[in-house]
Amino acid sequence: MGRTLAEKVWDDHVVRHAEGEPDLLFIDLHLLHEVTSPQAFDGLRKAGRTVRRTDLTLATEDHNTPTLDIDKPIADPVSRAQLETLRKNCAEFGVRLHPLGDVEQGVVHVVGPQLGLTQPGTTVVCGDSHTSTHGAFGALAFGIGTSQVEHVLATQTLPLAPFKTMAITVEGELPEGVTAKDLILAIIAKIGTGGGQGYVIEYRGSAIEKLSMEARMTVCNMSIEAGARAGMIAPDETTFAYLKGRPHAPQGADWDAAVEYWRTLRTDDDAGFDREVVIDASELAPFVTWGTNPGQGAPLSASVPDPGSFEDASERLAAEKALEYMGLTAGQALRDITVDTVFVGSCTNGRIEDLRSAASVLSGRSVADGVRMLVVPGSVRVALQAVEEGLDKVFTAAGAEWRHAGCSMCLGMNPDQLAPGERSASTSNRNFEGRQGKGGRTHLVSPQVAAATAVLGHLASPADLSDAAVSTPVGA
Amino acid sequence: MEAFTTHTGRAVPLRRSNVDTDQIIPAHWLKKVTRDGFEDGLFEAWRKDPEFVLNKAEHKGATVLVAGPDFGTGSSREHAVWALQNYGFKAVISSRFADIFRGNSLKNGLLTVVLPQETVDRLWKLVETDPAAEVTVDLVDRQVRAEGITADFELDENARWRLLEGLDDISLTLREEADIAAYEARRPSFKPSTVEV
């Protein structure tokens, strides 16, 4: 019997296997940020331990960092203290850090791949649930808690319970205007927020193979929103081409040896999965969420569902509570929902292709009156690339705000937040109650839908835009 | 870690599914750099509603949380576990937990117990009818007991042993240091390194 991609990567990292105990796995790359690491460093200090492998550890500042006035001291003293704590810890324990203002600073899941640190067949962990992003390279990558962060710092390993395997096969062509974000939102709506619980998902099929690396990252990023332990995509020529020449990619003979190994990682033809889901790409459409968890989504052309239509009692109750929180009524067309704020950014959709995609829709158009649009690049490198391509000018000419890199309004730990009752179309990953600010209401969308929504002032796709729409005031 | 053997206390019925960790502890609390002091942030937004179940006088001092399915979804923040513990909870019962939350809870000695939704429904009814009813969560016998309810639960033997003994995972792993060193010695040279180039 053959093995799956996930099983191969797992097997290659077993430090110790013993009956009745979790396998002890070696961790190839440990990423840190300011929010989930301070208590872990404290634990090390109290126990008199050191960081075992500083050469496999990298820290960035992202969750708390402001996206305006980054040359000034951070206004919020608590945020400032947390960043200063990370700086002190990294200096004390010898960990490489890219702080605010550094050219390599950015959202941890954008920085790892762009440096070439995220590689096929590696194990990647971070005290952040969206570590699943790195699975796009064929890495086994997952979010961990602070106790596990401390464990990895001290031992470079983790004892891990076995996982189940799920194949999500997406065949066919994605229709024009349908992106990786629409695909993953549709998948989560289909299998539910607990559908992936206990599983490592492998995304496969012709539609997945055609995706760029950045689109694959968007898909794997949101695996956690389906409850999965990780999401992975087999490495192929697209992966190798993305990695070649990046600062931390292997070079020379090491590159050849690495590629040879990476090619062996694909799931064997005779391997079995514990669960299989098949999706026809051609049936997909731009997808948005209407509720307060990422599984509560529907095609943009649909209406807000009637909670009574859900058979499951807990889903029905969840839908009722969601509509109440979101201020929506059953039967209302999703396209009729007006927004106050549009956010383009995050580890889900803050990469250069996402910015290009949003800019292509905004080019020559204007953000609707009364709508605030924030564009927050995922990293300083992404920002520099966008400036080189003139995308920043497209955004500012349209009336959007061009900001500095960070997590920003995805979770509102910095000043970028929704006010109570405000509604956003957001390219981020979570529409939980209060996620983007106390009382804020979030609709998850793709960068294209975000841009079209900014222009029209209500949830919309680029197909809804006409030249007339540009000169017609919003809400008309 | 504090050991967990058995606990008896009153329970709070939380009739909600998909209780994500942003609800358990909102992001602005995550700026703290300690493991304590999170009790006031627990379910902060919902607690503003006087009708919220945690605000009811009859549930004050309860130590067992009985929640709907998919508890602890979303962010990996361990602060969610600390907040529940800081508030006084010793155990959480649900028909399904998100993986990262469950892992975090077991690392901190907060027992997460998986029971069928039907049993959760019975526990909800019991404590709604009689808020003073006591619920016992017994890790030694892997059993939840309350008036008229006896339900066995599963927890893998290794996790159970670590909890019963209150063992420190890092110390356990460091006993295998020779295996770690041997693994490191055979890692291929093409593996990534974060040393600046």
Image: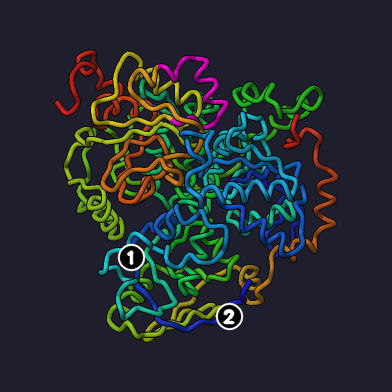
Relative to residue A140, is residue A257 drawn left or right? right
Residue depicted at 42% across the width and 66% down the height:
B40
Question: To which chain does the residue with label 2 belong?
Answer: B
Q: CA distance from mark 2 to mark 1?
A: 30 Å
Asked if the stretch drawn in magenta spans residue A387, the answer is: yes
Depth check, front residue: B125 or B65: B65
User: How did the renderer colour the structure?
Assistant: rainbow
Residue A312 in view, yes or no = yes
The tag on residue B47 is 1
**Residue at disc 1, secondary structure:** helix
Does residue A109 lie above or below B19 as drawn? above
Q: Quadrant of the C terminus of chain B?
A: top right
Left or right: A281, with A228 as reference point? left
**Residue at image point 46% right, 70% down:** B92
Percent x, y of residue A127: 58, 50
The residue at the far left in this view is A476
Q: Position of residue B129 (x, y in %)?
A: 27, 81
Q: Quadrant of residue A171?
A: top left
**Chain of the residue displaying label 1:** B
Corner quadrant of residue A30 = top right
Name the spot of residue A289 as percent of width and height, x first. Answer: 32, 41
Amino acid marked by disc 1? Arg
- Which badge, 2 or 1, comes first in the chain's sequence? 2
Q: Which residues are magenta?
A: A376-393
Q: Residue at x 51, y 52 (%)?
A: A78
Residue ID at (38%, 56%): B18
Write down the residue under mark 2: B5
Are discs 2 and 1 less than 8 Å apart at CB? no
Does residue A164 appear in the picture of this structure? Answer: no
Q: Quadrant of the N terminus of chain B?
A: bottom right
